Amino acid sequence: MRRIVDSESQTKSQTVLPLHGWQSAYELGYAAALWRLPLQKDKHLIVNFGTDIPKTKMMLEDLPSGFAVSPFLNLEGEEALFIKADLYIRFDETGEPVSENYPSTESSAAKEAWENECRNVSLVTQNDRNVSEFPTNSSEEFHLQSVKEALKAIEAGEIQKVVLSRTKHVALPASFSVTGIFERLCNKYPNAFVSLVYLPHLNQVWLGATPETLVSVDRQGIFRTVALAGTQSAFDASGQMIPPKQAPWTQKEIEEQALVSRYIISCFKKIRVREYLEEGPKTAVAGNLMHLRSDYAVDTKAINFPELGTVMLGLLHPTSAVCGMPKLPALEFIQAHEGYDREFYSGYLGPVNIDNETHLFVNLRCMKISNGMATLYGGGGITEDSVPEKEWQETELKCRTLLAVLEES
C-alpha cells in the first residue's frame, strides 16, 4: 500500500496512513473502526464496504474478524452491531502497515474506491479554539433530583446501587478534525483503549478512551475482566498529581468497587468456574481520574471452557459498574429517572477475532458526534453513602476527560 502524506505539508507523518484510511472510509460512507489497545503502540483499522451494519449474535468463538459495538440496553449481551472486516490493516508506531488482510473478495470495486480516496483525502487542520466556542448544557438540578430519588430507593431497600449518568453537549467548529482528537487521546491516555468508530447508517461517530475491560480473550486462551469503580481526581487541590499509593479512598468508594468485584465472582460461581486469579483492588490512574481496580484472569484451556468469553459477556453486560445492583431493578430505575437514551454509551465495543484475540471494553469516557454536535457522557455509582453534590462533581470530572482534549489547540 502506498504511503499517504498530507497535501499541505508533504512531510512524512507517523500516523497519517491510519488516519487517512479511516477518513477515506468516512468520506465514502463505509463503516470503519480505528483503535489502539492499552499499553500498545500499534493502531488497527477495519473497513466494511457494505451499506448497513447488521445486529449479530455475539457468539465470540464463531464470529469472523470484525469490530463489535453494543448499546447499553442489551440485557443478554448477545446482540451487537458487528462491523465485519472487509479490510483489516495493522500499523506500527511509525504508521507503516505491518499486517494486511482483505477477507472479502466480493468488494473489489469498493476497495479500489477506498484506495483512490486514500490518495486524495486531506485531513482537516486543527485550529486554535476557546472553551467559549463549546457551549454546554446544564442539567445539574435534574441530576441532583435523580440522585436524591435514588437515595430514597436505596433506603427503601429497592436497590443497593444504581449508576446515574448525564450528558453534556458541545458545538463543533467547521474545522473540527475527529482524527486529530483520536491521535491526541492516544498520546494522552496510553493505558486506555482508544477508538474511533463510524456508523454510517446511524450518521454517528463514536470516539473515546475507556479504561475498563469487559471481556478479553488472548491467543493463549486467557480470559480477563476487571472490576473498576470508585472515582476521584488524580490531582490534589494545588494541581499536583497524587501518587497512586497515597490515594485516599472513602468507605463509599471502597464499597462501590467491592460490589462490582462481588458481582464478577458471583458470575464465576454461577457457571462453576473456581480456578480464577484475582489481583487487587489497587489504585488505577485513568487520565485526570483515579479508580479502584481488581483484575480477574482464567485459563480457558486449563479448565476446558473455550466459550467462557461468550458466557461471561452475557452475564456481565451491563455490569454493576454502569448499571447497578440488583441489575433489573437498577435498570428500571435508570430508565425511569435518567431522562435520555444512552445509546452506545456504557455499552461495549472492541475488536473480535483479530489476530486470534478478542478485546471488548465498556464504552466510557466517550462522545458521540453527529450533525456538528458532540455529546459527552459522565456517570457515577449511587450508594447509601452518596452525597448528591459530590455525585454531580464526579460527572463533571468524567465529562472533562474528553472536553479537555476538545479544548486543546
Image: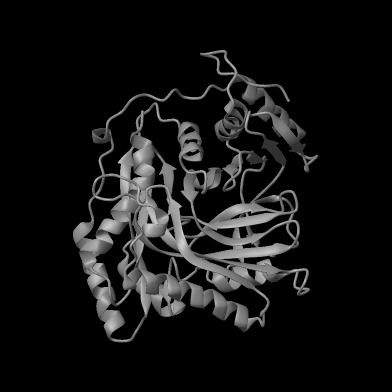
The outermost residue toward the right is: 105
Describe residue 20's horizontal placement relative to residue 371 as left or right: right
Image quarter in which the N terminus is found: top right
Q: Residue 312 falls in which quadrant of the image? A: bottom right
The relative height of residue 17 versus residue 160 in the rendered view (above or below) is above
Q: Residue 216 falls in which quadrant of the image? A: bottom right
The outermost residue toward the bottom is: 157
Counting from the top left corner in percent of width and height, residue 53 is at 61, 50
Of 184 and 70, nearer the camera is 184
Describe residue 214's horizontal placement relative to residue 244 as left or right: right
Describe residue 392's horizontal placement relative to residue 225 as left or right: left
The relative height of residue 175 versus residue 272 in the rendered view (above or below) is above
Instruction: Identify the residue at horizontal 75%, vertical 56% (top origin).
Output: 219
Counting from the top left corner in percent of width and height, residue 86 is at 72, 42
Instruction: Identify the residue at horizontal 33%, vertical 35% (top origin).
Output: 407
Q: Residue 332 falls in which quadrant of the image? A: bottom left
Q: Is residue 335 visible?
A: no
Colour scheme: one colour
Q: Is residue 129 visible?
A: yes
Of 108 and 103, nearer the camera is 103
Image quarter in which the C terminus is found: top left
Counting from the top left corner in percent of width and height, residue 75 is at 53, 71
Describe residue 166's horizontal placement relative to residue 271 as left or right: left
Counting from the top left corner in percent of width and height, residue 223 is at 67, 65
The relative height of residue 74 versus residue 121 in the rendered view (above or below) is below
